[in-house]
Image: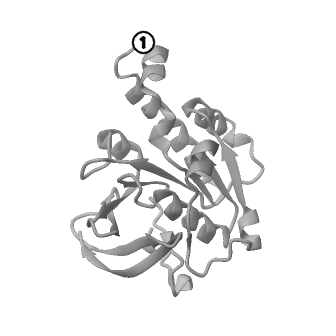
Amino acid sequence: MMVERFFSAVGQMDFQPDQPSDSILLLSGPPSSGKSSLLFQFAFNSSLSGAVVFLCNRRRLETKPPYLSQGIDPSSDIFQRIQMKYLDDHEDIKKYFAAFHIHDAFPLSIIIDDFGDFFDDRNCQERYNNPRGKDLAMIRTLALCHNAIAHARETGPCKLLLSDTHHSDSPRLLYIYKRWVSSIYTIKGDGTGLFLLKNDFNSGTVGKRRMRAAKYSIALQNLILEGIGEDQE
């Protein structure tokens, strides 16, 4: 999957088709880097081709709503194709995917905003009676997600996009994500209000290849794409 999918970019019809391995994707970045806005633009773009389900915490979304790309009409009928589902914790995620197989038709994309925040350390430790309860809970939830998406992809395209927050140079719990995620997109800020989005991990890539990187900013309540270019991976 290319970084253009996260923006309202010129030439959307020129997008290259997704790779067969692009089933579960992760978008990871520092706080206040526009992750929810990128996810919502991804949802908008995906809804042009099919149904989209957006899973999130209602209070967080209402407290800090996502911004739209310049030129996107917030009253567009296209947003009606995005089904919002509100969750409280990781058990709600498991319930959703445990019943996934009974759907008559599967969405083209499922998006989970702030995936890692659905796992409370203390609750997970108590539930699993283990100091690494959060790790165990994430592994079991990701395994369930993986099986559900694999089942859906037997009949047509379907992908899961997660977001998480990291405070260092790489996603937290990276060793867990790499087991289940096919591609990881990371965001880095330059300290001036500009951010760089690029693919830092792709399980289907052998050796180095040219990857696309996007530079963007958030200003005047808009997600603004500053440019897209090649990034050596």
Nearer to us in this view, 104 or 5: 5
Residue 199 percent location from the top left of the image:
34, 64
- Residue 151 seen by the camera: no
Q: Residue at left 46%, top 58%? A: 35
Q: Residue at left 49%, top 16%? A: 127
Nearer to us in this view, 57 or 219: 219
Q: Quadrant of residue 202?
A: bottom left
Badge 1 crowding class, 10 Å Cα cut-off, few under 14, some 14 to 19, many 20 or more, is: few
Residue 16 percent location from the top left of the image:
48, 78
Nearer to us in this view, 176 or 226: 226
Residue at the extreme top: 129
Name the amino acid type tagged 1: Asn
In the image, taking residue 131 as reference, residue 58 lies left or right, namely right
Q: Secondary structure at mark 1?
A: loop
Q: Residue at left 76%, top 64%? A: 80
Q: Residue at left 49%, top 46%? A: 114
Check disc 1 and report the residue beneath it: 129
Nearer to us in this view, 180 or 132: 132
Vertical placement of residue 13 versus 58, above or below: below
Vertical placement of residue 20 versus 56, above or below: below
Residue 203 percent location from the top left of the image:
34, 56
Q: Quadrant of the N terminus?
A: bottom left
